[in-house]
Image (tube, rainbow, N blue to C red):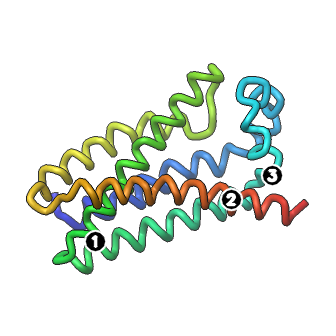
Amino acid sequence: MQTSILILSLPIVFIFHDMEEIVGMKSFLRENKQFIISKIPRAKKIIENCTTEGFALAVYEELVLFIALSIAALAVESCDIFLNLWLGVYIGVAVHFLVHIGQAVVIRKYIPALITSIICLPVSCYFIALSVEMFSKRLSVVWIVSGGILAAVNVFVAHKLSEWWGKKKK
């Protein structure tokens, strides 16, 4: 597999998955808001301020970051830091798919994100394994972990961005 296709798979897999969330979130929350809050009380704050626009803004912010990181990993191939950060972020995105599958298990119901999480998790694991094989001599655990931390921090930032937009629109 070509390096460019492999690296660009991150934003492609991400947006394929998040489109399911964007499209299904509003109707899902309208029909299941109280049920979710009863199952996961700490979700109330997030749900109260969730709008389709705010969520789409958060997804857009994440997509821009993933595209920029992927382009940096391609453009500056001699700098292994970007490649390692990219891999760490990809691992974080794969963990994100696991979280969605776990959420559906906890509430015992379909959630917008479940179908594409089930599809994207094995695809992501394959691309991650292929990356490790292709770039094994260039990998650094410190920078991969840093990429995972970047992904986790960015999820927090994206949620805050979505919440801010939802409050702004009220």
Please tell me in which quadrant of the rendered image residue 69 appears. bottom left
The spot of residue 52 in percent (x, y) is: 74, 55
For the point 55% across and 54% down, the residue is 155
For the point 40% across and 44% down, the residue is 94
Q: Nearer the viewer, residue 96 or 113?
A: 96
Label 2 sits on residue: 160
Label 1 sits on residue: 73
For the point 33% across and 58% down, the residue is 9
Left or right: residue 35 versus residue 91 is: right
Residue type at the position of mark 3: Asn
Mark 2 closeness class: few <14, some 14–19, many ≥20 residues within 10 Å: some
Mark 3 closeness class: few <14, some 14–19, many ≥20 residues within 10 Å: some
The spot of residue 2 in percent (x, y) is: 17, 63
Distance from disc 1 to disc 3, alpha carbons, whole Å, reads: 35 Å
Distance from disc 3 to disc 2, alpha carbons, whole Å, reads: 10 Å
Identify the mark nearer the N-term, 3 or 2: 3
